[in-house]
Amino acid sequence: MSSKAEEFDLLVREVFAPCYPVVANEIIEKTGISNGLCLDLGCGNGYLGLAIADATNMEVCLLDNDAEMLSICQRNITARQSNERVRTQLGDVHQIPLPEQSVQLVVSRGSVFFWEDPIQAFREIYRVLSPKGIACIGGGFGTVEIKQQIDRQMEQRDSGWKEHLRERIGPGCTEKYPPILSEAGIDNFKIDHGPTGLWIIFGRS
Ligand SMILES: C[S@@+](CC[C@H](N)C(=O)[O-])C[C@H]1O[C@@H](n2cnc3c(N)ncnc32)[C@H](O)[C@@H]1O
């Protein structure tokens, strides 16, 4: 097992853990979707998708292009006895290995910032969305209190934390996405950008 994936899991469990159930509920509330298949893109160790599985009856596919992250996902799935509804999928957001219009809810937290070709990735997300499906892509912490708590801990561990946040979800980041979405053929979208994060929300209808 890669120490990088294990180190990331430890960091997530020690620092980021409180945000996942809150972000999951926020997404379920915003989209109104709680049935069908949920795809968590760039799932890391799977905590957002697992929180969505806990809060709904959805089947969840945890997709990442890092096999070691997925081994930890599998461990987390087994620990939570979620095997019946949650599975892992090795894959790349630029070529999602799922049929078109097969996913009711696409979620992705903290991964879009690393995609090499976001236009192609958004095209792929749009392709797999079901006719009434919704995608919620971005990065966020749930509440201001949770974000402040995470910021305090991360600033002690990582001197570049504030700068990472500014580049990814800071003021001015809203403007990055409309041209990318338009190029991907997605005209009907909303960018929800506030003190707790930045989310790009769109559907097919
Ligand atoms: C910062 S982590 C976020 C993990 C998780 N979503 C979370 O919120 O804890 C970013 C994840 O995106 C994944 N990733 C980056 N580029 C990807 C790609 N092209 N296809 C699939 N996964 C990707 C990485 O392997 C990593 O697990």
Image (spheres, helix red, strand yellow):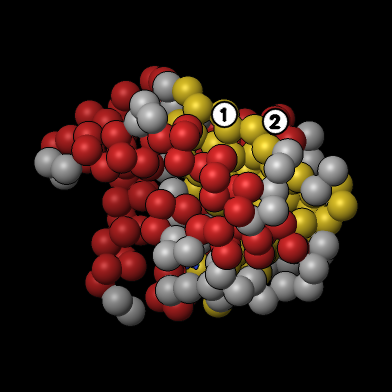
- Residue 140 in percent (x, y) is at 46, 36
Question: Which residue carries the number 2 mark?
Answer: 30
Mark 2 near mark 1, Cβ–Cβ under 8 Å? yes
Classify mark 1: residues with Cα within 10 Å, few (<14), some (14-19) or many (20+): some
User: Is label 1 in a helix, a strand or a loop?
Assistant: strand
Quadrant housing the N terminus: bottom left
Q: Residue at x 36, y 41 (%)?
A: 168
Seen at 54% across and 50% down, the residue is: 180
Left or right of 43 on screen, residue 144:
left
Quadrant for residue 160, please give it: top left
- Check mark 2 vs ligand 1: CB closer than 8 Å? yes or no: no
Report the residue at 83% width, 56% height from top.
130
Residue under the image location 56 percent in, 69 percent down? 94
Question: On screen, 204 above or below 118?
Answer: above
Say left or right for 165 vs 89.
Answer: left
**Identity, as a three-letter code, of the amino acid under mark 1:** Asp
Q: Amino acid at mark 2?
A: Lys
Which structural element holds mark 2? helix
Which image quadrant is residue 10 in?
Answer: bottom left
View quadrant of ligand 1: bottom left
* Image vertical order of residue 194 relative to residue 32, above or below: above
Mark closest to the chain's N terminus, 2 or 1: 2
Query: Which image quarter holds the C terminus?
Result: top right
Percent of width and height locating residue 164: 26, 42
- The residue at which mark 1 appears reads as 192
Relative image position of residue 73 (x, y in whole percent) = 50, 66
Judging depth in this view, the residue of 32 and 1 nearest the camera is 32
